[in-house]
Image (tube, grey):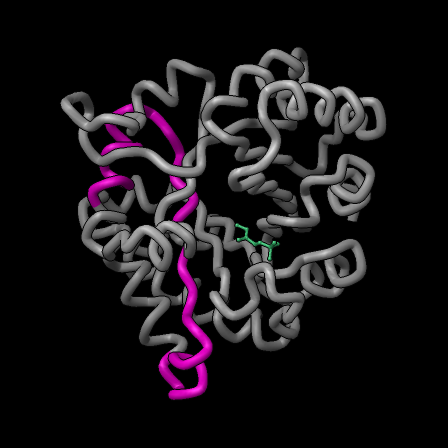
Amino acid sequence: MKHPIFAANWKMNQGPADALAFMRQFLAQYPRQQDRSVLIFPSALSLSAVTGALSDRPDIQVGVQNIHWADTGAYTGENSAAIARGAGARYVLIGHSERRHVFGETDEETGKKAAAAERAGLTSMICIGETLAQREAGDTSTVVLRQLRAACALLTAHQIAGSLVAYEPVWAIGSGKTATPEDASIVHAAIRSELRSLTEERGEGVPILYGGSVSKGNAVSLLAAPDVDGLLVGGASLDPDGWSAICRT
Ligand code: 13P
């Protein structure tokens, strides 16, 4: 039996007032569930609005979309893992496609950020995915497994086994083009196999989420695919009605 994870990445949307209004509406329609988990990644500045709305809801956890790799220091505008943790985050997205492709984050930086997350007690969701050109060149698994190894480079096998992975093909993000469940399964199986060796055979329980143009319409078939343990949702997570429908998939 799967215990699916539904993760909402709000990206640069929903300030504190909108986040609070969202949570009120979402919680009213989505009573506590035992058989699934929900993760919400708001803007760091909306974190306290989201956590403040959550009392007695251990089925819903909150995370940040990014952290700096240093613990403290002169890094104007950045947030450390410890600051995020102190503000109520329990999870962090590492190496999201937009961090890599808009802000030039490197494989090496993802590794340093995952290590910083561990030091502060945040759980990493390691985001990996190939571009369209890489897919068309037949390099999908080479790229995603390289990204996975780099993000895990400074972690112990035990720490990797406690992390999550999100496969988000770059060409599917915000494009309306979703990987087919079969395509997602093939890549997830390759990730699973790499996780087995990275964790010294403790990788079976690492949740592997799919992300990229997930909607109410395709959530059921994606989640039914082998090795797809959850969904990481951008645009379709911004509407509380649609999001609660996806979380009930
Ligand atoms: P969309 O669901 O809007 O395609 O975004 C996916 C994503 O990047 C989630 O992290």
x and y percentages locating residue 124 in the rendered image? 39, 39
**Is 36 positioned to the left or the right of 205 in the image?**
right
Q: Is 138 colored magenta in this rendering?
A: yes
**Is 137 positioned to the left or the right of 116 in the image?**
right
Return the residue nearer the eye: 90 or 95.
95
Please tell me whether residue 248 is drawn above or below residue 221 in the rendered image.
Answer: above
x and y percentages locating residue 191 in the rendered image? 41, 65
* Residue shown at the point (47%, 17%) measured from the top left: 88
Magenta range: 112-139
Please tell me whether residue 130 is drawn above or below residue 7 in the rendered image.
Answer: below
* Residue shown at the point (44%, 86%) measured from the top left: 136
Return the residue nearer the eye: 200 or 179.
179
Residue that protrudes farthest toward the left in the picture: 74
Residue that protrudes farthest toward the bottom in the picture: 137
x and y percentages locating residue 223 in the rendered image? 68, 58
Q: Is 172 colored magenta in this rendering?
A: no
* Residue shown at the point (67%, 19%) measured from the top left: 20
Q: Quadrant of residue 13?
A: top right
Q: In which quarter of the image is residue 215?
A: bottom right
- Number of marks in the rendered image: 0
